[in-house]
Every structure is written in C-alpha cells, then in structure tokens.
Amino acid sequence: MKIAVSSYSFSQALNDGRMNIMDVIPAARKMGYEGVEIVRGRQTHEEMLALAGELEKQSRDEGIPIIAYMVGADFLKNGLDAQVETLKKELEVAARLNTKRMRHDSTGGRDAEGRQYTVEEALPIVAEGYRRVTEYAAGLGIHTMIENHGYFFQRSDRVKKLIEAVGHPNFGWLVDMGNFMCADERPEDALKTAAPMAVHAHAKDFHYKAAGEYVPPQGWFGTAGGNRLRGAIIGHGAVNVPACLKLLKDAGYDHWLSVEFEGMEDCVKALEYDINNLKEMLEQC
C-alpha cells in the first residue's frame, strides 16, 4: 500500500494562515507522502475549476499524484435532481485535477423541511442519486465512493446495504477505519464487512472515553451512542490500526492508504509522526 495524506489533515495550518491549499502538495512531498487527496473548499465552481488546474500542474511538477477529490452532498436536504447536477459539476473539477476517485456524501437524514427519514426510507433515494452520479462519472473515467462517515450512513451494515442497492461497478467504499468508532463499532469488527468492498482507504486514530467518564471541554465530540472521541496521532489512540491494516491486506486491498489527522497536536508535526508510525505498522503486517 502507498501512503497518501488528505488536505483536510492540514486544517489547522490552513485555518490559522500558516498555509494555503497550494502549500499542501509540497509539504506532503517533503514529509514523504506519495499522494494527496484534495478536499473541496469554499470556492465557487469557477474558482474551484481554476484552482484545480493549478493543483494538477503542481502535482505533476512535484511528482505527487492527486489520488482523490472529496466533496459534500445531501440527496435529501438538497433534493435528488439538484444534488445530482451539482455533483456532475464537481466531477468536472475532479477531471481537471486528473484524479480517478471522487468521494461524495450521502445525507444527514433530514430533508429541506427538517423531516427525519429512517434509513429504510432514505436508502432508495440515496441509492438512485449515487447510481446516477457514478454512471456519469464512469464516462469521465472517475470512480465514485461513499465513505463511512456522517452518522446516518456510517455503520458498516448500512454502508454495505447502500453499495449493494446502488449495484454499479463504478461505485465502491472508501473505508475509514477510525470513523467506525463514531458509530460505536469496533473498527476491526467493521473491517470484516468493509475490507472486501474497499476501493480506497483512510488511516485514522481516535482517543476514546466511554459515556459517563469525565470529558475535558477541549477537542472531544460525541459518538452515535453517547461515547466521546478525540482525534489522535496514528498509533496513539484506541483504533487497532495494525489489525485494520491486516484485514485490508488479507482482503486483497493493495491501493492507497490516506492519512486523515483530526487531533489537537500541531498538524505538521503530527503528520510527520503519522507517516513514520504507519510505515512501521505496514512493514510489520
């Protein structure tokens, strides 16, 4: 597996002004990462298209491929037809980036009027949206993906059902080993379902506190079941990363492994630790 990093991992430095998006690829190369994911910013579509051209040129100059493009979406809140058309425009950006993977979100579970849907109600709508987008993406040579995040379609059984409902060879699973903890699943248990369906993967770690424990106010967020998580340097947290890597490997996965860092430590230093720790784990498994 080759190790990449998401531009999202640099959020601290991007938000405090130390870096801008054009600094991400050179920084990743210096740290030893072999690829970069680009996460959609707040730019207009025209601005993002122009930026994509600059990033694609930079990636060629630096010898660091842009391995995926990540965007938001909500087929319930934004409406099925409108969201499909918006995602087609995002695929134009992905094509300009010269990437072959695009992840987009599914739904938070509520429509524009605030009505809460059950997973069973939302499944056929979301599946149709993903199918229409991935059919269009296939013509551009871009594979689309769902990531297990966002609480609503996050548990491994729900993601599996959605992928099966879409039923298209151009659509697959971006397996994020850490995010299963947000749905109160043990990552190594969830990977038994997810690994055989993986087309892309995120390496991520979290610190963990069970419901009822004292939780400091800095950096923690809740899981679906009321436990608490805080982003961690890979190997420092509660995710059994080596076991997850072995499950991916045993399932035949031999593609990109992209680091997402969400912790409180300085992101630049943390990402240096992340790649070194991850390399050691990969060598051992």
Image (cartoon, rainbow, N blue to C red):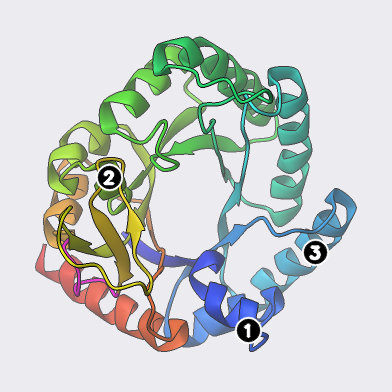
Q: From the viewer's perspective, tell me whether residue 15 is left or right of residue 67.
A: right
- Residue 32 placed where, x, y %? 42, 81
Residue type highlighted by circle 3: Leu
Tag in front: 3 or 2: 2
Q: From the viewer's perspective, tell me whether residue 16 is left or right of residue 161.
A: right
Q: Secondary structure at mark 1?
A: helix
Q: Are marks 2 and 1 in contact (CB under 8 Å)?
A: no
Closest to the observer, 262 or 61: 262
Residue type highlighted by circle 2: Phe
Please tell me the numbered disc located at residue 214: none
- Residue 256 placed where, x, y %? 39, 56
Q: Which residue is mark 1?
A: 16
- Residue 112 placed where, x, y %? 68, 26
Which residue: 33% across, 77% down? 275
Residues rendered magenta in the picture: 233-238
Q: Earlier in the sequence, mark 1 or mark 3?
A: 1
Q: Residues within 10 Å of mark 2 (few under 14, many from 20)?
A: many
Q: Earlier in the sequence, mark 2 or mark 1?
A: 1
Q: Which residue is mark 3?
A: 51
Q: Earlier in the sequence, mark 3 or mark 2?
A: 3
Disc 3 versus disc 2: distance between alpha carbons? 32 Å
Q: Secondary structure at mark 3?
A: helix
Q: Residues within 10 Å of mark 3 (few under 14, many from 20)?
A: some
Residue 167 visible: no
Disc 2 versus disc 1: distance between alpha carbons? 29 Å
Please tell me the numbered disc located at residue 180: 2
Closest to the observer, 122 or 161: 122
- Residue 143 placed where, x, y %? 55, 36
